[in-house]
Image (cartoon, rainbow, N blue to C red):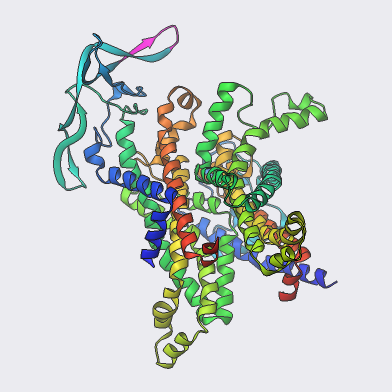
Amino acid sequence: MIKDILNGIFKDKFAVIALLVLCFIYFCLFFAEFIAPYSMNYTDRELSYVPPSPIFLIDENGKFSRPYTYNYKRTYDADLMQTVFKLDRSKKYYIKFLSRGEEYLYLGFIPMDRHLITVENSGRLYLLGGDINGRDVFSRLLFGGRISMTIGFLALFVLFPIGLLYGGISGYFGGVTDMIMMRFAEAVMSIPSFYLLIILAAILPSNMTSTQRLTLIVVILALIGWAGFARVVRGMVLSIKNQDFVKSAKMAGASDLRIIIKEVLPQTASYVIVAMTLSVPGYILSESGLSFLGLGIQQPDASWGNMLKEAQEYINILYRPWLLTPGFLIFIAVLSFNLIGDTIRDILDPKSRIR
Amino acid sequence: MQILFYISKRVLQTIPLLILVSMISFFIIRLSPVDPLAELKLNPSISKETLKLEQQRMGLDKPLPIQYLLWAKSFIKGDLGVTTTGEKVSVKLAERIPNTLLLTIVVIFLTWSVGVPLGVLAAVKWKTPFDRFLTVITSIGMAIPSFFFAILMLIFAVKSGWFPVGGLTSYNYDEMNFIQKFFDIAHHLFLPVTVLFTLSLAGLQRQMRANLLDVLDSDYVKFARAKGLSENKVIFKHALRNAVNPMITLLGFEFSSLLSGAALTEFVFQYPGLGRLILEAVLKSDINLVMASLMIGAIMLVLGNLIADILLILTDPRIRAKA
C-alpha cells in the first residue's frame, strides 16, 4: 500500500513539487544551527528592528567583487521623531562561507563552530532583518520552524492512539458503552474548538520550563481533535466487527482488547493515513494561532506563530514587513501538506480513482 | 405530523447534550489553579457586599458538584455573575452575541451563494483548465492562516485608506439615519467578512464539487442521460437536488469552524464579537465571563447543528425513514 501511495505521489506534478518543498524545509530545519548565521538567542540591542542587510556583488567602482555587506548605523532623526537606520558605507564586511563563527552545540550535543554563511568579525548579517530585541529573524525562523513543523506530528502521536482506542472500544462493544462514550465525544465536539484551545492553554501555569510547556501544548492540541476522529473510527469498527475473521478470532478465545487492537483497528489503516496527512496542517495552523495570541510557545523560544506576534502592531506591519516572513512560511508549509494529503486521499479512495 | 415528531425528538436530544457540555466546560475551568475571585478582590471599586454575593452565588466553600449545580441553576435563571470590572456578564454577552451572529450569518450566506454555484461549475467542467484553476485557488484559500490573512488585509486597509480598521461602527454612528447606519456597518464588516469568506469558501466549493461528481456518476443520472435529456435538465433537475443534501449537514460544521476562525479574525480586526470577548476574558482570567461565553458558544454551535438537521429532515425523506 505504501508503494501505491509513493507511486501515486510521483505521478502527480503538484504533489512532487509539494514533497520537494517540504523536504527542503525539513532539511533546512534539521541543519538549522549550521545554516543560521546566529544562534536563536543572539541579540544585539543596537539593532532592534534593523532592516535586512543588503548584499552587494558589485563594488563602488562598478566591478564584480566577493559578496559583501555594510553595517547599519542607528541614528535618531529629530524631525521625524523616530530612529532610522542608515548604511555605514565606510567599512565593507565580506561574507564568508563555511567559516568559523559563533560556537554552538549541533542538535544539542555536538560542539561545532562552522556556519554556512557568516560575516567578518564585528559585521552583522541579518538576512531578514531584526526583531524588537535585535535578534536575527532569519536564524530564528530556522529554529522556530523546528517547533512549528514538528508539533503537528507530535500531537498526532498523542491523538491517534486515544482516538483509535476510544472509537474501537465504543464501536466493538456497542450498546450502552457505545451510547455513553459517543454522547461524551459529541459533547466535546460541541464546544467550539478554538474557544476550548485558548481556555486550556490559558490555564497552564506560567512558571513552567519551555519543554514542559511544549509537551502540554502538544497534549492540548491532541485533546481538540480526538473526538471527531474517534467517531469516524467507531463507525468503521461497527461494520468491521461483524466480519468472519473477527468472529473466528473470538472463537479462538482471543481477549476483547486483543481483537480490537490486532484484528479490528488495522483494518482502518487507510483511513488513518489519510486523516493523519490531512490533519497535520490543521495542527500547524492551530499552534501558530495560539502562539500568535501569546498562549502557545513563549519567548525566548521561537515558533513561527509567536514571531508573528509582533505583527499585531500597525507600525510593524507597515514599516517592518520582514517581520511577516513566518506567515508566508506557514502558508507554504500548509499548502504543501494539503496538496500531498489530497493526492494520498485520491489514491486510497477507490471512488476517486475512476475519475 | 410525522415530520413534527422527528423534529421534536431531535430538539429534545439537544438538552442532555447541552447539560454534558456544561459539565465538561465547568470542570475544565475549575481545574485551573486560578482563584475565581482573585481579580475581583484586587479591584478596589468592587464592594465587599458584591464579593460576598459572588462567593455565595458560586458556592465556593462547597464541594465541586454542588458548585456545578449552583452554577447551572443561576445560568438557567440568566444570572451569570459579574466580570472582573464589575459589569454584569449577561449585559456584556448581550452586546457581543448579535455582532458575532451578524458576522457569521453574513459569511455563511455569502459562501453558500458563491461556493455552491462554483462547486457545480467545477463539477460540470470537470478536469478542464477552469476546474484546475479553481482547485489551485481553493488550495491557496485553505492554506493561509486566518490571522495572517487578516493582517495582510489590515495592511491593505491602512495603506489604501478605503476601509476603517477595527470596530463595527463609526464614532458618529448614533447621529446617522437608518440607511447611513446600514452602510456604515457594511463598510466595517467588509474586511472581516472577506477574510472569513475566503477561508470557508474553499471547503464548501470542494465539497459541492465532490458531491455533484459522485451523483453524476450514479446510475439514475446515467439513465437520465441515456433517455436523451438535455445536459442542463440532467444536472439541474436530477443531479443537483441530491448533491445539495449532504451540504446541509456541512452547514452545522461550517458554523462551528466559523466560530473558531472568527475568534482570531475578530482579534486582529478588533471586532466586538464573542470570540474576542472570550479571548480577553481568558487573558484576564475572568472566570465568570469565560464560563458564560464558552457556554454561549457551545449553545450557538448546538443550535446551528440542530437547524441543519431539521432542514435535512425537511428535505430528505430518507432521513425520516431512518429516524
Front in this rendered view, residue A292 or B121: B121
The part of the image, by quadrant, that contains residue B73 is bottom right
User: In the rendered image, is residue A204 in sight?
Assistant: no
> Residue B137's spot in the image, x, y percent?
55, 42
| Residue bounds of the magenta highlight | A73-81
Front in this rendered view, residue A237 or A2: A2
Q: Residue at (51%, 58%) from the top-left corner?
A: B28
Q: Which quarter shows the C terminus of chain A?
A: bottom right
Front in this rendered view, residue A276 or B226: B226
> Residue B14's spot in the image, x, y percent?
68, 65
The part of the image, by quadrant, that contains residue B17 is bottom right
Q: Residue at (44%, 90%) from the top-left corner?
A: A248
Residue A291 in magenta stretch: no
> Residue B186's spot in the image, x, y percent?
71, 33
Does B3 sit left or right of A155 as displayed? right
Q: Which quarter shows the N terminus of chain A?
A: bottom left
Tell me if residue B128 comes above or below residue B323 in the rendering.
Answer: above
The part of the image, by quadrant, that contains residue B156 is top right
Q: Residue at (40%, 47%) from the top-left corner?
A: A18
Q: Residue at (64%, 23%) from the top-left corner?
A: B162
